[in-house]
Each structure stands twice: as C-alpha cells, then as structure tokens.
Amino acid sequence: MFNEPQHIPLINHQKVLTMTKEYDLIVIGTGIASVPARKAAQEGWTVALVDELPPGGTCALRGCTPKKYLRSGAEVMDLLERMNSKGLLKNDASSSWADLQKHRYEYTNPIPSNNEKQYENAGIDFYCGFAKFENPNEMSVKDSEGTLIQLKFRNCVIATGARPTDLHFPGHEHLLSSDDFLELPALPKSILFTGGGFISMEYAHIASRFGTSTKVIQRGALPLKGFDPDLVKQLVNVGQQHSGVEVLTQREIVSVEKLSSGEFSCQVKNQENQTVETYQADAIFHGAGRIPNIDRLNLDAAGIAHSRKGITVNDFLQSTSASHIYAAGDCADTGSPQLSFSASREGVTLSQNLLEGNQHKVNYAGQASVAFTLPAIAQAGITEEQANELGLDVTVVYHETERWFTNRRLNEGAGASKIIIEKGTEKILGAHFLAHHCEEFINVFALAIHHGLTKSDLKTVPWAHPTSASDLARLLG
C-alpha cells in the first residue's frame, strides 16, 4: 500500500499550489455507485474520493430524492382534484411550490456536509474538483480556485454518472436541465419538455398538478420507451384528460428562439405530415435523454476503452483495457438500464471484486423500474414484445383495472396490468402495471422474477386485505 494520506482541504489553497498524493484507490464520483470507497477504507486501504460537485451524487441531490419530495405535493393536489365532491371538497385548497421546496431543502441541504464528515471519520480524503487522467496511474484534480493536485493510484473506480445528451438545433442553449427544474423557486406558467423519457414525463406530471401548462414533445410514437405500450397509452390519455399533460408525438424540435417578451418560441416538425408547428412557453426543459458523463476525463491517456455507451467493462465491472480500472453506474457500459438501484448493486459487487479478486457478477434479473407519473407506471422483467422476440412460450395475463376497488376508491381514472408467465414452469418473467401504489407492489414481482418464483408461489401468499398487494392473486389469472 501507499503511505497513509493526510486530509487536504482544497478550498483555501492558493492557485499556485501543486502537490502529489498517492492512494490505493481513487473513486471518481460520490453518488450511489461510490460504495467501493467506504468498503476499501474499512479494509485499511488509502482512499480518496473526487467530485466536481458537492458530495452526494445525482440520486440524493439532483434526482430521485428531490423529485420524490416535489412529487409528494403533486400527489396531494392530484388526490384533491380526483376526490373533489367524492368525499372531499377542493374549494379554495392551494399549494405553495416555494414551501414545498423549503421542505425538500431541509432534507437535501445537509447531505454534502454530512458526507464530508463521514469521509473524514472513515479516513477518506475528499477532493472537490474536476478530475482528468494524465496516464494509467495518475490523474490531476483542479478545483474552482484553480488549485492543481496530482493524485497517483493503484486502483481507480469511475462512477461519474450521466449528463444530458448534446442537442444541436439552433437555440438549444436556451433549454434548461432537469437540475434547473429541481431548483426552480417558482414554477413558470407554461413549460415545454423535449423528449418523452422519465424526466419529461415525471416533471410534466408534477408541474401540471401545480397549475402549470405542460407539453411534452416526443419524437417517437409513444413516450416512456421500454414500458409496456398498452399501459403507456392509458397513461398518456389519463394525463391529458385529468391534468392537462399534453404529449405531442411524432414531433421533433428544430429550433428555439427567445422572444422579447421573455417567452420562448419553439419550432417543431410534425413527422407525420412534415409541417412545422410553433409553440410558445415560459420555459423549455431538456428531457431528451442522458449519456455517460465521461467525455472530460481524458480516458485515452489512461488507456481506458470506451464508447458512446460508456466505459467498456467485463462481467466483473472491470475495464477491458486497463485491469486496475473499474466502472459502475450510468457511466459504465453494462447493458443494464440507468437506474439508481442498478448502480448501487454494481457498486457493492465492484467492491467485492476489488477486495477479493474478480469473483462476483451482478444479477440484473427482475430489476424493477418506475416512472413516477400520476398515476405511476412500473415494470419488472421482460415485456410481451421481448418474450415474442426471444421465442418464449408464454401466457400474457392482461387486466383493465380502472374499475377495481383499489383504483376506483381513489377515482384514479386509469388502471391496467400485464403479467408475462412462462407456460409449463409457470415462472413469472415480466410484470407491468399502471395503478395506484404500483411503485410499491412491483417489488413483489421483482423478487419473484429475481428468484424464479412461480404463479402459484404468489397466488398462495396470505396477503393483507384490502391492500393493493391483495389484488395480486386476481391479477395473475
């Protein structure tokens, strides 16, 4: 191992300062995939963490956590709207985005300083700055003050996450990011979202519940690619009918212009009839996908193979071209979806491989994913289309559940389920839901798929009644 490191705060150093430190392990990124830093430090390794942003990562500071806080307010307003005159009277009920943001900041603001304290207690050095590889065993870190630190390492984990994909149409610089949305002190009266993925659909549903007019510009025939299309169609319909979330499909933004009024004019090409449509909004947000955040790391200097899909890794999350380099999370080309829990599992597995040698692989079977729209849409395992492509002999159990008690009692306005079951074995291969609380009970199906459980295994469970989970026996057919 290298010499014991000393914690070196960067903020007060002068720009001319340069020094070299040596570590057994450096982890770039402080998000959910940065687990190896703590695990290695517990085993006596000298460890450093590097991040150009406050420590905590996307999920805790710029994604899952703040989003769910803001959605909590949207849920209440949504319920009031749906249950108005059905036991509740909306009357003059009002909402305060500013107060909701304050509620959220009470939780998220302490995260960076708490993390720094934990790093210090664990003997981990933290460098807040931009990392750049200089050669296979050395990187430089420059902070916001221009301080330059040279760091040598025996092993390195890259967990830098993803960033918004580059846009190239005229006026793209006017688009705000998902990070910007989460920091809004007040909501605009009207918003356009480009792209129909998680970010656009979730944030459109949140904003609409606070009275913002929202439109989603989607290039394909449906938003939320990867989710069951039959369920997505229902979600689009109920979103427009109940909350005014308008999804404009087969359309692509071709230019954006800022008007003297402060609004933005957006030129959109309708791919069906090749006409150009014009929409105006107070703000336009980038939701057209994310790409691995690796382009500024100078990976070639360290001989790290990579592509537009991320750092090329083997089944052990080890670089295929540099054996002392590992990668996890959204910046790694694992073929898995960009989900927080996938990154977490990869971080744990990667830790084991670093400390024990390459023996462990991530089992992604049954990975659940949820788009936190209102209502939510959830899935685990394979889709009906994938089952057909794989030539599997399956039974597809489909139900319209809008009028079922679980959804009807809250006047949801939509509901459906689709479960993919292998004939013969009756193993559950996929599960898809648009329903109240589906973001919770999808985990039952993730468990079933991950461990190879069958239809009868779930049908014979004595679920609590009446709960959303107690519908499962009926949903399985």
Image (cartoon, rainbow, N blue to C red):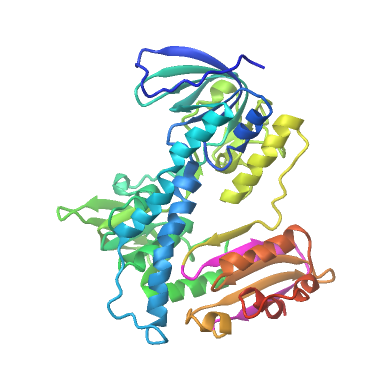
Question: What is the residue that sits farthest to the left in this orientation?
Answer: 260
Image location (x, y in percent) of residue 239: 42, 72
Residue 247 quadrant? bottom left
Residue 130 quadrant? top left
Judge by depth and name the residue closer to the eye, 444 or 119. Answer: 119
Q: Residue at x 71, y 76 (%)?
A: 476
Residue 158 visible (yes or no): yes
Judge by depth and name the residue closer to the eye, 421 or 59. Answer: 59
- Residue 383 covered by magenta stretch: yes
Q: Locate residue 288 relative to residue 465 in the image: left or right.
A: left
- Residue 354 covered by magenta stretch: no
Q: Locate residue 393 relative to residue 441 in the image: left or right.
A: right
Judge by depth and name the residue closer to the eye, 320 or 433. Answer: 433
* Above or below for 26 versus 397: above
Image location (x, y in percent) of residue 50: 50, 29
Question: What is the residue that sits farthest to the right in this orientation?
Answer: 424
Q: Residue at x 41, y 79 (%)?
A: 82
Q: Residue at x 47, y 39 (%)?
A: 114
Q: Residue at x 42, y 53 (%)?
A: 287
Image location (x, y in percent) of residue 132: 49, 24
Q: Locate residue 253 relative to residue 409 in the image: left or right.
A: left
Image location (x, y in percent) of residue 47: 59, 25
Q: Quadrant of the C terminus?
A: bottom right
Range of the magenta residues?
A: 374-402
